[in-house]
């Protein structure tokens, strides 16, 4: 994903009257930090959920324990429920969710660098996708996932 002009993203959201929320797991709040590093972002960025544990996903976002059991935390199904839950638990209009394997390590079935994203906008279908960033190292995967999530928000506001 290309570089995202965050001030422009915020300006487009502001002009459209769109409030943003995020639900983050493997990025640990990096998207929220990127958005709130810009002065004046409080009129656009509503809140962020850092739901690193499965319990937090269930308690704060309403992710189904059955979905976690059936698909695991790193899945498009969980990313969908995280994005939907972020909208349900905030007055925001647009939500991005991130859940993945930052590493080091992973497994044969869920390798390091696999990150699932959800994008939810009130009144629209939730979009989900999985990106295989590869073994970039923990900080590399986290940064790539943050950048991709910001790109999803920017595209949704284009």
Image (cartoon, rainbow, N blue to C red):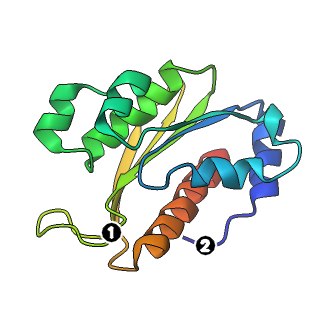
First reached walking from the N terminus: tag 2 or tag 1: 2
- Quadrant housing residue 137: bottom left
* Residue 17 locus on image (x, y percent): 77, 30
Q: For the N terminus, which image quadrant?
A: bottom right
> Label 1, on which residue?
103
| Residue at the image position 37 percent from the left and 46 percent from the top | 128
Percent of width and height locating residue 113: 33, 69
Q: Camera-side residue: 119 or 134?
A: 134
Residue 134, image quadrant: bottom left
Q: Is residue 156 left or right of residue 7?
A: left
Give the alpha-carbon distance from disc 2 to disc 1, as whole Å. 23 Å
Q: Nearer the viewer, mark 2 or mark 1?
A: 1
**Are discs 2 and 1 less than 8 Å apart at CB?**
no
Instruction: Give above or below for 38 relative to 96.
Output: below
Q: Nearer the viewer, residue 5 or 61?
A: 61
Q: Residues within 10 Å of mark 2 (few under 14, many from 20)?
A: few
Residue found 60% across the figure and 52% down from its top: 31
Q: Compared with residue 18, is residue 25 higher up or lower down, i.e. above or below?
A: below
Can residue 118 be seen at all in this image of the molecule?
yes
On the picture, is 104 further left or further right than 66?
right
Mark 1 is surrounded, within 10 Å at the Cα level, by few (under 14), some (14 to 19) or many (20 or more) other residues, namely many
Q: Nearer the viewer, residue 41 or 104?
A: 104
- Quadrant position of residue 127: top left
Q: Residue at 82% of width from left, 55% of height from top?
A: 7
Marks counted in the figure total: 2
Q: Position of residue 145 (x, y in %)?
A: 48, 62
- Name the residue beneath numbered marker 2: 2
């Amino acid at each position: 994903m290309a570089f995202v002009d965050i001030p422009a993203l915020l300006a487009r959201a502001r002009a459209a009257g769109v409030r943003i929320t995020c639900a983050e797991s493997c990025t640990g709040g990096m998207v929220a930090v990127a958005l709130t590093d810009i002065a004046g972002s409080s009129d656009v960025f509503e809140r962020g959920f850092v739901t690193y544990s499965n319990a937090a996903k269930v308690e704060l976002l309403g992710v189904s324990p059955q979905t976690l059991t059936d698909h695991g935390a790193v899945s498009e199904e969980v990313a969908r429920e995280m994005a939907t839950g972020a909208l349900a638990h905030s007055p925001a209009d647009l939500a991005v969710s991130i859940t993945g394997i930052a590493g080091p390590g992973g497994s044969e079935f869920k390798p390091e660098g696999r990150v699932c994203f959800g994008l939810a906008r009130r009144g629209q279908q939730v979009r989900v996708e999985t990106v295989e960033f590869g073994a970039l190292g923990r900080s590399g995967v986290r940064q790539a996932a943050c950048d991709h999530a910001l790109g999803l928000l920017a595209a949704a506001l284009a």
